[in-house]
């Protein structure tokens, strides 16, 4: 049982260190926000983070999994706690009006020039990670163990976690005993949300090419029209959820891209689709993907397609499962740090993350048993706006606020930064603390 005096003393120590480092972290956040970089292009971002962590006394390794950074702080015998923050931005033109708004553009892997914005708050996550690193380095006399900080690239394309694991994250550095992470949401700034068990959905984006035999629009009988085949595919895919998924399960099948042809009087040779699937059951997820393949092949045969359709996995991740016992432990640490009134029950999200690969032995490819994970959420909405927003519950209010991936989303409130720093630090200390916690 924890000692109330030592818990209060630890809270005060964390608060003091957060205030000491907050101004520097705020400056880092604004710098990262002003100069965002696309997935696997985070060269300047990762260099800046690496330099900052080295200055704090961490043993830093660059270039893990491409542009990833790993920072280690060994502090005697004890558990290894991994804290993860992501770094990449999105191809969105910023409309926040901030004086440090991004005006950057970049070239995608397909050679297209696009605007770039931190519209998901990964700059906030990285800044909070650095802030927590500073707090924990200053408090090292209060804990024992190994702190492992991971600055991860390419979360937005679900590539960075596996790239770092494939590059020996757990063999070159350490295999953690617990993996902790967080994400911002438009809840009230200063609050922290937790969810045990299934927290975020598995997601797969498929690219599909449907082949036809093009020709003149006036002579369709001499062609095989891939547009008609694609239209039937889009309609038929909607029956998967309605007729093949049990009603109590949550599955989403979305055709987000359908492109074919260049001119109205020309029947094209092919059509391109991109299909997004989300679910909370990895086995069911695979069955749904099988149904998509079956339907597309059948519609191509029915439409006289001259070639088999082509399938490409563009991005993929698994269900995020928060270990319930570990959630309880972290939640208690956050209650001690912020107060029970500042905690809320986070609803399950159809959104997805590649964070779960760090804990899943089979999907992550690191062998052995799974590693428990805890992933929580920090609020980013100023109090005045939160009070003016319609709704009673957290979920109801968030429906009326800008969400991540909006060009108007700006989560970097000072209170959110402080909360994110303290949440990571107190969460880590729930495992790293020494004799005073017993």
Image (spheres, grey):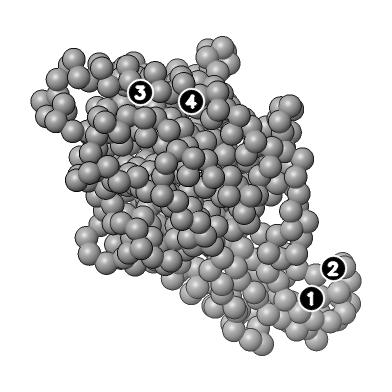
Q: Quadrant of residue 33?
A: top right
Q: Nearer the viewer, mark 4 or mark 1?
A: 4
What residue does disc 3 label? 14
Inter-mark Cα distance, 4 to 3: 11 Å
Task: In the rendered structure, find residue 21 and report the number of the disc placed on it.
Answer: 4
Inter-mark Cα distance, 2 to 1: 8 Å
Mark 4 vs 3: CB contact within 8 A: no
Q: Earlier in the sequence, mark 4 or mark 2?
A: 4
Inter-mark Cα distance, 4 to 1: 59 Å
Q: Residues within 10 Å of mark 3 (few under 14, many from 20)?
A: many
Q: Earlier in the sequence, mark 2 or mark 1?
A: 2
Where 47 sits versus 28, above or below? below
Q: Position of residue 178 (x, y in %)?
A: 27, 47
Q: Nearer the viewer, mark 1 or mark 3?
A: 3
Q: Is residue 251 visible?
A: no
- Tag 1, which secondary structure? loop
Q: Residues within 10 Å of mark 1 (few under 14, many from 20)?
A: many
What residue does disc 1 label? 268
Q: Earlier in the sequence, mark 3 or mark 2?
A: 3
Q: Nearer the viewer, mark 4 or mark 2?
A: 4
Q: Position of residue 198 (x, y in %)?
A: 33, 45
Q: Residue at x 87, y 79 (%)?
A: 216
- Tag 3, which secondary structure? helix
């Amino acid at each position: 049982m924890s000692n109330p005096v030592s818990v209060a003393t630890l809270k005060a120590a964390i608060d003091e260190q957060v205030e000491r480092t907050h101004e520097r972290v705020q400056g880092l956040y604004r710098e990262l926000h002003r100069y965002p970089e696309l997935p696997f292009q985070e060269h300047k971002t990762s260099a800046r983070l690496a330099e900052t962590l080295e200055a704090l006394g961490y043993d830093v390794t660059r270039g893990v999994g491409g542009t990833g950074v790993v920072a280690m702080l060994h502090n005697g015998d004890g558990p290894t706690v991994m804290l993860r923050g992501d770094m990449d931005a999105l191809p969105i033109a910023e409309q926040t009006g901030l004086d440090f708004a991004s005006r950057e553009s970049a070239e995608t892997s397909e050679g297209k020039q696009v605007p770039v914005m931190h519209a998901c708050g990964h700059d906030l996550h990285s800044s909070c990670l650095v802030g927590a690193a500073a707090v924990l380095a200053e408090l090292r006399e209060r804990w024992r163990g190994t702190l492992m900080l991971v600055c991860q690239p390419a979360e937005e394309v679900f590539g960075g976690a596996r790239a770092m694991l494939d590059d020996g994250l757990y063999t070159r550095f350490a295999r953690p005993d617990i993996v902790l992470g967080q994400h911002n949401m438009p809840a009230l700034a200063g609050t922290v949300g937790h969810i045990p068990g299934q927290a975020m959905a598995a997601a797969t984006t498929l690219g599909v090419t449907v082949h036809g035999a093009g020709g003149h629009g006036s002579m369709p009988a001499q062609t095989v029209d891939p547009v008609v085949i694609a239209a039937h595919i889009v309609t038929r895919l909607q029956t998967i959820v309605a007729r093949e998924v049990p009603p109590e399960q949550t599955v989403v099948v979305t055709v987000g891209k359908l492109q074919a042809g260049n001119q109205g009087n020309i029947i094209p040779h092919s059509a391109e689709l991109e299909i997004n699937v989300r679910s909370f059951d990895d086995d069911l997820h695979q069955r749904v993907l099988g149904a998509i393949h079956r339907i597309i092949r059948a519609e191509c045969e029915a439409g006289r397609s001259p070639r088999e359709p082509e399938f490409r996995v563009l991005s993929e991740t698994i269900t995020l499962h928060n270990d319930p016992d570990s959630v309880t432990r972290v939640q208690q640490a956050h209650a001690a740090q912020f107060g029970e009134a500042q905690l809320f029950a986070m609803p399950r999200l159809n959104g997805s993350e590649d964070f779960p690969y760090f804990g899943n032995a089979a999907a992550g490819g690191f062998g052995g048993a799974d590693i428990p994970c805890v992933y929580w959420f920090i609020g980013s909405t100023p109090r005045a706006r939160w009070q003016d927003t319609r709704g009673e519950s957290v979920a109801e209010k968030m429906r009326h606020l800008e969400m991540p991936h909006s060009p108007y989303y700006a989560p970097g409130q000072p209170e959110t930064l402080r909360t994110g720093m303290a949440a990571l630090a107190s969460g880590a200390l729930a495992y790293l603390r020494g004799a005073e916690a017993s």
